[in-house]
Image (cartoon, rainbow, N blue to C red):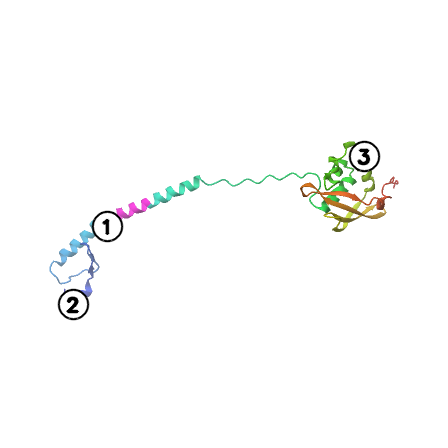
Amino acid sequence: MRGTDARHCAVGGGEGVWHVEAAGGCGYPGESVARERGLLALRDHEPEEEMRVRKIVGSVLVVVATVGLPACRSAAPAPSAAPVAQAGPGAGTPSAAVERFLEAARATEVTTMAQLFGTTGGPITEREPAEAVEKRMRALACYLTHDSARILENVPGVGAGRALQVELRQRELTRRTRFSVVPGPGGRWFVEQFDINALSDFCRPVPPR
């Protein structure tokens, strides 16, 4: 190869493949034949290489698709929501026990009152006959007749119990009494007793307006 012609062509390759990047004579015998053979060899190899690449790509796609299918089929369904437990006798908190007991007394719902009135052993309905319980709840409801009520204080009571001071209003009367609330079975709270003497003038015939 002549030095003056080297800058006009760059020939390289392997395995009989020639990459001709510049036209023109390189100054060695058989140049045109080598270039022609090189180009022909390149043309002959391109389809074979392209087919081999396509086969590899196709195989990869098949493998990816095959691996992905079991994951879709074996996906576990979303767990359903757990059922909500039904509330039994009593209330969830001491204040809730007093509030619900007062609401039931105001509406003279003796059955609800009986479910909230009890001891650490549970509601009164589990210890006394239904008829006696109803009479007792009606008597208590008379003293708890009110137009409005609010809890003023919630402090520790005897043992694990709580003592709640409540203000009740009935017409022109305003009285305060103290409720004793105790925990029972299942962590439920029950009204054990209240100061009925502080509400003695609540249980009387209501004068006409």
Q: Earlier in the sequence, mark 3 or mark 1?
A: 1
Name, please, the residue furthest toward the front.
159
Q: Earlier in the sequence, mark 2 or mark 1?
A: 2
Label 2 close to label 3 by CB (< 8 Å): no
In the rendered image, residue 90, in percent from the top left (x then y), is placed at 71, 41
Q: Which of 3 and 123 lies nearest the eye of the viewer?
A: 123
Q: Which residues are magenta?
A: 46-59
Residue 44 point in image, percent of width and height: 20, 49
Question: Looking at the rendering, in which quadrant would you find the N terminus?
Answer: bottom left
Judged left or right of residue 177, residue 61 is left
Separation of marks 3 and 1 at Cα, in angstroms: 103 Å
**Residue in front for this viewpoint, 165 or 13:** 165
Which residue of the protein is positioned furthest toward the left in this rendering?
Answer: 29
Residue 88 picture location, percent across and down: 68, 38
Q: Which residue is mark 3?
A: 135
Say which residue label 1 marks.
Answer: 46
Residue designated by label 2: 3
